[in-house]
Amino acid sequence: MTDKKKKLSNLSMFMVMLGFTFFSASMWAGQQLAAGLDFRGFIFALLLGGAILAAYTGALGYIGAESGLTLDELSRRSFGSRGSYLPSAMISFTQIGWFGVGLAMFAIPVASKIMGLEVTPDHMPWQGYLLVVVAGFLMTGSAYFDIKGLKIVSYVAVPAVAILGTVAMILAIRQGDAGLVEQFGKSGNTLGIIGGAGLVIGSFVSGGTATPNFTRFAKNAKIGCLATVIAFFIGNSLMFLFGAVSSIYAGGNDIFDVMYNLNMFYFAILVLGLNIWTTNDNALFTAGLGLSNIFSKPKKLMVIIAGIIGTVAAVWLYWNFCDWLNVLNCTLPPVGIILILSYFLHRKDYLAGKEPARKFNWASIAGVILGATVANLVSWGIPAINGMAVAAVCYLIGTMIYRKSNV
């Protein structure tokens, strides 16, 4: 259980979760939504996808706050003491990957646009690598200092990104030759609402699976759930709007391009860096917990090792691994739904602090493997939902078989 002295205030809990959702890759998805939907479709896709994502992360937030357990500790009980290595490895691998990509997402535009250097997939100037190293050191440092470091970064970054990003978005719309609704009307309407909702869910469902790692510091389960649901709605909506406006009015990937085109160079660097920082330190914190579960080493040591790996591989990850990371995103929702089902089916055991009796829960492991396969291969519907549905069926069937065999 989490030490009561480490519990966060309600505001701090909300700020940490809101900062967690400030993710530049969500702006990229906002760009895709703007290209494929009119304004009405954009709003409906945002609401539908946001509601599903909020329900998923809200349930995990409730569980983390009530039990005081990390994702990896929950996995030990639902996957078995050794079986938990699978979800721990999956979450650690993806979060180190996104950490590295985030570093490059900061260094590359600053090096190319602000510093005027030539950056290509085959060439990165030394100044770009220096930016990666400095950013990697700072972001690893905040993750090293546990929830205190994450809280400090969130209190600085959340207001700055929200205010400056919103101001830049309004200025861009005012300088455009048409209003926001009219600009959306120029889209080709090539993307349906269901497909758009799938993009909203997929943009952060993998990171959202790690929600218990942070909400275990909430004062109670209600706060953990509400802080997560509200933060995900506000944070994701802002990121998607920033991405849509960036695409429509600046032709860029994110709000950095808008601010750059408005000659707000220094603010652009500040917003880009802080926006990535709030997600990257959470990602590294999660990776450290996962590696600690696998290798039975102190979390802080694992955070440092994960930070070094992500920093060294950052530029390579950015140019070569983003597509693979999007594939891996589909593997984590099956983990999350199994954690949710296992907790509510065995809630008394969890709250009593009972350790897992089995080394492997094969129903859980099979559910993740089959769910991830379906999520990646089946084109119909929403991949994350498909994967969770298959994983849930596998887990429930396996649980019933196990109970009958032990009667």
Image (cartoon, rainbow, N blue to C red):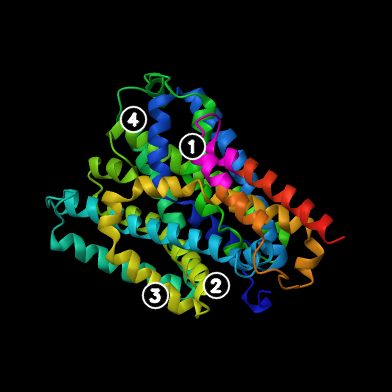
The quadrant of the image that shows the N terminus is bottom right
First of labels 3, 2 by sequence position = 2
The quadrant of the image that shows the C terminus is bottom right
Residue at 64% in and 65% down: 360
First of labels 4, 1 by sequence position = 4
Give the SS element for disc 3: helix
Q: Which residue is mark 1?
A: 377
Taking the view exactly as shown, the residue that stands out farthest to the front is 405
Foreground label between 3 and 1 = 1
Give the residue type that dot 2 points to.
Answer: Asn
Q: Which residue is mark 4?
A: 248
First of labels 3, 1 by sequence position = 3
Foreground label between 2 and 1 = 1
Q: CA distance from mark 4 to mark 2?
A: 44 Å
Residue 106 visible (yes or no): no
Residue at 61% in and 40% down: 52
Q: What secondary structure predominates along the stretch shown in magenta?
A: helix
Q: CA distance from mark 3 to mark 4?
A: 39 Å
Give the residue type that dot 4 points to.
Answer: Ile
Categorize mark 4 by other alpha carbons within 10 Å: few (<14), some (14-19), many (20+): many
